[in-house]
Amino acid sequence: MQVAPMQAALTAAYVFHTLFAGLWVGAVVLTAWKVIPLARDGDASSELLGGVVSGVSTITRIGALVFLATGGHMAATVYGAEGLFAPPRGHVVLTMLALWVVMTGLVEVGGSRARSALEQNKVRTAARDAGTFYNAAAAIGFVLLVLGGYLAA
């Protein structure tokens, strides 16, 4: 059985999009759930927190490129311009796009706040300043995965 090139590209887009989404949301959730509380309690070094924040920021930035490429390909191939405005699936895609932008912004602001405090070697302050942003980003990430599951079904 031979797979058409267009179908192979679409399948690859789904695979990379889903894998990277899981990696990104997982990294944000782990940061919000475990690393930030450890740092807030004074049980993490500035090097550890800085490394995690830097890593999550890197994943977020690479993810922006991956999600634009794969999501754009999927949206154009599966929905087209008209389909994106058709309920319910098109609206879910547009909602996911908006939530992705918000989550990216939250991670970037949280990372910036943490880095500012870490420059002064204030680990607890960094965790406190960034915690709300990472918690909100983790919650949005969960919603994004649920909506992605809905679209995949």
Image: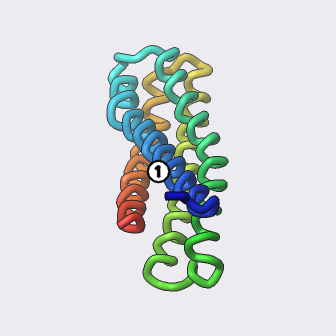
At a point 43% along the width and 58% down the height, the residue shown is 144
Residue 115 lies, in percent from the top left, at 59, 28
In the rendered image, which quarter is residue 71 located in?
bottom right
Taking 104 as reference, is 72 above or below it?
A: below
At a point 39% along the width and 23% down the height, the residue shown is 39
Helix or strand or loop: what does disc 1 sit on? helix
Residue 151 lies, in percent from the top left, at 41, 67
At a point 38% along the width and 28% down the height, the residue shown is 35
Q: How is the image coloured?
A: rainbow
The residue singled out by tag 1 in the image is 18
Q: Is residue 37 left or right of residue 74?
A: left
Taking 63 as reference, is 94 above or below it?
A: below
- Which quadrant, please, contains the C terminus? bottom left
Q: Is residue 143 left or right of residue 130?
A: left
In the rendered image, which quarter is residue 148 located in?
bottom left
The amino acid beneath tag 1 is Thr
| Res 63 visible | yes
| Res 102 visible | no
Looking at this view, is 143 or 149 the one in front?
A: 149
Q: Is residue 21 left or right of residue 72?
A: left
Residue 20 lies, in percent from the top left, at 51, 44
How many numbered discs sit on the rendered protein?
Answer: 1
In the rendered image, which quarter is residue 59 located in?
top right
Looking at this view, is 144 or 2 the one in front?
A: 2
Residue 79 lies, in percent from the top left, at 57, 76
Taking 137 as reference, is 116 above or below it?
A: above
Which residue occupies the extreme front position in the image?
1
At a point 50% along the width and 64% down the height, the residue shown is 96
Q: Dot 1, crowdedness within 10 Å: few (<14), some or many (≥20)?
A: some
Taking 96 as reference, is 43 above or below it?
A: above
